[in-house]
Structures are given as structure tokens and as C-alpha cells.
Image (cartoon, grey):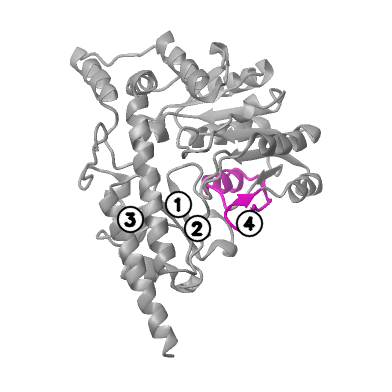
């Protein structure tokens, strides 16, 4: 590695590494679950935070104009999206942001639609806030997933859906949606008066040959669309608790502002603003190196598994640093946790977390770690599953 440095995160209060016992019941697993990186943040971020710490006063902080300017330039330079300063709003994270917007735009028992397999806090937001969960599953094709527009529109009509939480790029299946795909699903929402929360937190983690297109840039959808994004996945800053909502529509902005005023949240902590501004201003070279590492890890894992375990199914990774792997041909659903944890020694996100029993045979693997960790994980899976296959042949 050049600018990107892998760190041993054990005994650092890392949820990913030190939370294994609480989450999985064992502390000796290789953690490839929760979506953060095992890489140091860019040097520019560390220097900016050191400068602030050395100043030594941590009173009330008013984020400077340069914070928003850095985000605006980033969106223009890398996503060709022209964001106006007054569209930008703060949330401590994308998950709190879409939970707040769900409260603002819907009422109890209203239908909220998602597309499983999908990031499980979407479902949690709907269920925990007493809305009606409506699911329009993605369609699995030979190498990727696609949206089922007919089913999506039918479910909207049948359940009087009020809100769609849209994952773009899609976690966990790794799709980077094309312009026409985004337009088609947004046209359906506009036709039926459905609000859209576009979770674009993985917008910068895109593999070569693919281009992330902000949903808000593909047409006239301002009256129904709010974008939620952050630098936290891009630059490994989740602990800084800083994310951004882009709300072009004045009425929707007013509703958001009123809600935050009612719950008395005026902004975030200084460290988050400083880290994010610095990353957007000077972190691009670091990110390019990270993307190469992630892509290399993906190919290593995929080539190893497909060579040694030909019945494994892995969709093309277009975006995110999360790999969706179907091991259903080798592991029965009821044995998944035992095999992965006890025999393979891995901590992963299980497919069942992302939807219904259809995904019980899947795991999601975090690729944002060292090549050695990915190699070890691949070797453990191959060793265990080939042995299971060999034993099954003698039964």
C-alpha cells in the first residue's frame, strides 16, 4: 500500500473487531461484517483533526462555509451533480436521516416500500416506526439483480404506498443503477405521489467501468426526492457521525427544518465537520488507492471461490465494498451460522438479515480490509466447504 495503511484494530473499542463476542458469541473470529474499513483515514483528515485538537478549545462550533463548498465541489467534480448550498442539511448519519424523514413524510400504518435483499435498517425503520412494510424483491439474473418495475408499481397501488427507500448503489447486491433504471423507478413514484429517500452513502465506492448517477440528477423529481449521503463510507469516518441530506424542494426543506427544530437538533460535532471537509478537499488520491484494493480483494475472493467451489454464485460487483455470496449449494440454512462461525472462523452479515428466507444461503463479506484477511477468508471457506462436499458424497 502507498497512502493507504492497514491497521490492527483489536482492543481499540472497534465495533467490528471488539464487538464480536456480543454479536456472534465468540471473540476469535475474522470480522468481515459491519461496513467500515480497516484502513487509516486519509492523512489530510488526521492533520486537520490534530490542528483542531492542538488549538485546544472545543466549544460550540459553527461549520464554516467551506464545509458545504467542499461537498458541492465533490458532487460536481465526481458525480456531475450541481448542488446548491441552501439545499444541504445535516444528520448525524444516513440511518437517523431516513428515520427522521420517514416520520416527516408518513404517518403510522402508511405503506413504505423497499427492495430486498437490502440494507436491513430500511426494514427496521419501517417496522420500528409502525409503518406498513411493503417489499418488492429484486429479480436475480445470471450475473446481477434488476428491479421488478411491474411488481413495484403493483405493490404501490395495492398497498397505497407513501414512501420508497431506494438504495443506490445497492447494498448488498452491488448494483450501480443505470440512468434509465433510476428514471423508470422514479417515474413510477412520481406517477403515484410516492416520496423517495435515495440512500447514496456508497456513491463513491464504484468499480472500474461503472458510474454512479445521483438519482436527483436524472430528471425533474425534486418534489418527491430527498438524497441522503455522507463521506463516512468513502473515507472511513463513521465514528465522526456526519452525513448530508440534499433537499432541493423548499417545502420539503421546511418540513425537515421544522422537525429538527422540534427535536432540538441544530447540528453535529466539530470533529465530523472538520474531517469531512478535509476528506472532500484533499482525500481523492487516497480513495483511488482504496478502490484498487477493494477491487483486487473482490477478484481474489471471487476467483478463489469460483475455481474451488463451482456451485457458488456471486453477482458482479459494480459498487460498494460489500460482496454478496450465495453458498446455498453447500450449506443448509439451519447450518449457516455454525459452519461460517465455528468451522470457517468468520464473522459476516448473513443473508437472512437482508430479507426473507430466500436469502438464507447468502453471506455478505466486507472487502475493505487487507488482502491477507480476504485470502484467509477465501481459503477457510474453500477448505470447509470442500470437506463438507467430500463427506456428503460418501453418505
Residue at 47% from the left image edge and 38% from the top image edge:
208
Q: CA distance from mark 4 to mark 2?
A: 11 Å
How far across and how far down the image is residue 199, in percent? 55, 35
> Magenta part of the protein: which range?
117-146
| Residues under numbered marks 4 and 3 in contact, where contact means CB atoms less than 8 Å apart | no
- Disc 2 residue crowd, few under 14, some 14–19, many 20+, Cα 10 Å: many
Q: How many marks?
A: 4
| Residues under numbered marks 4 and 1 in contact, where contact means CB atoms less than 8 Å apart | no
Residue at 77% from the left image edge and 49% from the top image edge:
150
Q: CA distance from mark 2 to mark 1?
A: 8 Å
Sooner in the amino-acid sequence: mark 2 or mark 1:
2
Residue highlighted by disc 4? 141
How far across and how far down the image is residue 37, in percent? 33, 41
Residue highlighted by disc 2? 314
Q: CA distance from mark 4 to mark 3?
A: 36 Å
Nearer to us of marks 2 and 3 is 2
Sooner in the amino-acid sequence: mark 4 or mark 1:
4
What is the number of the mark on residue 323?
1
Nearer to us of marks 2 and 1 is 2
Residue highlighted by disc 3? 22
| Residues under numbered marks 2 and 1 in contact, where contact means CB atoms less than 8 Å apart | yes
Mark 2 residue element: loop
Mark 4 residue element: loop
Sooner in the amino-acid sequence: mark 2 or mark 3:
3
Q: Residue 385 lies in what quarter of the image?
A: bottom left
Which residue reaches farthest bottom? 395
Question: From the viewer's perspective, is residue 209 above or below residue 85?
Answer: below
Sooner in the amino-acid sequence: mark 4 or mark 3:
3
Mark 1 residue element: strand
Q: Give the quadrant of the C terminus.
A: bottom left
- Disc 4 residue crowd, few under 14, some 14–19, many 20+, Cα 10 Å: few
Amino acid at each position: 500500500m502507498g497512502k493507504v495503511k492497514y491497521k490492527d484494530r483489536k482492543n481499540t473499542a472497534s465495533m467490528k473487531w471488539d464487538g464480536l463476542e456480543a454479536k456472534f458469541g465468540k471473540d476469535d473470529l475474522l470480522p468481515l461484517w459491519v461496513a467500515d474499513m480497516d484502513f487509516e483515514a486519509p492523512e489530510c483528515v488526521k492533520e486537520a483533526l490534530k490542528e483542531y485538537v492542538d488549538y485546544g478549545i472545543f466549544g460550540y462550533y459553527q461549520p464554516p462555509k467551506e464545509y458545504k463548498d467542499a461537498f458541492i465541489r465533490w458532487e460536481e467534480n465526481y458525480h456531475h451533480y450541481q448542488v446548491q448550498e441552501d439545499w444541504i442539511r445535516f444528520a448525524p448519519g444516513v440511518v437517523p436521516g431516513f428515520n427522521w424523514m420517514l416520520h416527516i413524510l408518513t404517518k403510522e400504518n402508511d405503506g413504505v416500500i423497499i427492495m430486498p435483499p437490502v440494507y436491513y435498517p430500511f426494514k427496521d425503520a419501517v417496522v420500528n416506526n409502525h409503518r406498513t412494510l411493503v417489499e418488492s424483491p429484486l429479480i436475480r439474473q445470471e450475473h446481477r439483480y434488476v428491479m421488478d418495475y411491474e411488481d413495484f408499481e403493483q405493490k404501490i397501488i395495492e398497498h397505497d404506498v407513501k414512501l420508497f427507500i431506494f438504495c443506490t448503489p445497492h447494498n448488498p447486491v452491488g448494483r450501480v443503477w443505470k440512468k434509465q433504471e433510476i428514471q423508470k423507478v422514479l417515474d413510477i413514484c412520481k406517477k403515484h405521489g410516492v416520496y423517495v429517500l435515495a440512500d447514496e452513502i456508497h456513491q463513491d465506492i464504484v468499480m472500474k467501468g461503472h458510474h454512479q448517477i445521483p438519482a436527483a440528477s436524472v430528471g425533474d423529481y425534486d418534489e418527491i426526492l430527498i438524497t441522503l449521503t455522507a463521506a463516512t463510507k468513502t473515507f472511513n469516518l463513521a465514528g465522526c457521525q456526519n452525513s448530508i441530506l440534499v433537499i432541493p424542494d423548499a417545502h420539503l426543506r421546511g418540513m425537515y427544518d421544522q422537525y429538527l427544530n422540534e427535536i432540538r437538533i441544530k447540528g453535529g460535532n466539530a470533529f465530523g465537520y472538520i474531517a469531512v471537509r478535509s476528506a472532500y478537499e484533499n482525500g481523492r488520491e487516497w480513495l483511488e488507492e482504496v478502490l484498487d484494493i477493494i477491487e483486487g480483494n473482490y477478484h481474489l475472493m471471487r476467483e478463489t471461490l469460483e475455481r474451488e467451489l463451482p456451485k457458488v454464485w456471486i453477482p458482479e460487483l459494480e459498487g460498494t465494498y460489500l460482496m454478496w455470496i450465495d453458498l446455498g449449494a453447500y450449506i443448509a440454512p439451519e447450518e449457516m451460522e455454525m459452519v461460517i462461525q465455528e468451522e470457517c472462523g468468520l464473522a459476516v452479515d448473513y443473508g437472512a438479515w437482508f430479507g426473507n428466507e430466500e436469502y438464507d444461503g447468502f453471506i455478505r463479506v466486507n472487502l475493505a480490509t487487507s488482502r491477507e484477511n480476504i485470502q484467509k477468508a477465501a481459503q477457510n471457506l474453500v477448505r470447509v466447504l470442500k470437506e463438507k462436499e467430500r463427506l456428503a458424497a460418501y453418505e
